[in-house]
Amino acid sequence: MSSSEINSQKYNTVTTKLFNLILTLNLEQQRFLLKNVEKFVLKEKRSSARKVCRVPVNYFYKERLYSNFIINISRDGCFIEAQKPIMAGEKILMDIQLDGDGKLFRIKGEVANTNRIGMGVEFEEVSSNLQKKLGYLLYKII
């Protein structure tokens, strides 16, 4: 038996066991499991900690304006609630108000991942002024 056949057999065994265990859970337990697995997978991909928030954001994609909320943010990116998330790999332009002074910060970003509730966006070309504002916002949220 080749190594790829052995790996395939292991994969099938593990997947089958996981699937059977999930089927024994009630709906509430399945949702809890899904939420925690999503957190685990996203946590492994991040280079900096994110903080929960609710910040309005306007973003532009293919000459169209969208308005939603950022539900968590870090120095490197954010997660935007969206009923119809934009596909991973696509570039967007965001306007975010980080404090009460009314000043909007325009940030370029790339959609890094999507799920059923929205999309994770990695910031690009973040100015030092914006880095300071993000640091302050993250400090306030703690």
Image: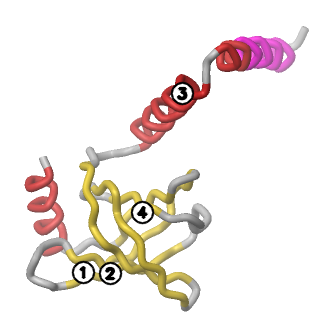
Q: How far separated are the C-alphas under marks 3 and 1?
A: 40 Å
**Could you tell me the amino acid type at mark 4?**
Ile
The amino acid pointed to by label 1 is Phe
Residue farthest toward the bottom in the current orientation of the protein:
63
Q: Is residue 37 above or below residue 54?
A: above
Q: Marks 2 and 4: CB-CB under 8 Å?
A: no
> Residue 39 at what x, y percent from top left?
43, 36
The residue under label 2 is 95
Q: Are marks 3 and 1 in contact (CB under 8 Å)?
A: no
Amino acid on which disc 3 is placed: Glu
Q: Which residue is mark 3?
A: 28
Q: Secondary structure at mark 3?
A: helix
Mark earlier in primary sequence (2, 3): 3
- For the record, the magenta segment spans 3-17
Cα–Cα gap, marks 3 and 4: 25 Å
In contact (CB < 8 Å): disc 2 and disc 3: no
Could you classify mark 3 by the number of other residues whose Cα lies within 10 Å: few (under 14), some (14-19), or many (20 or more)? few
Measured from the top left, where is residue 88 in percent x and y? 58, 61
**Chain-order first, disc 2 or disc 4:** 4
Instruction: Look at 90% across and 8% down and name the residue there.
Output: 1
Residue for point 50% across, 65% down: 82
- Circle 4 is placed at which residue position? 80
Q: CA distance from mark 1 to mark 4?
A: 16 Å
Q: Secondary structure at mark 4?
A: strand
Residue 95 relative to residue 64: left or right: left
Task: Rate crowding at label 2 as few (under 14), some (14 to 19) or many (20 or more) other CA atoms within 10 Å.
Answer: some
Q: Are marks 1 and 2 in contact (CB under 8 Å)?
A: yes
Q: Which mark is residue 78?
A: none
Kindly state the secondary structure of the residue where label 1 is placed: strand
Q: Which mark is residue 105?
A: 1
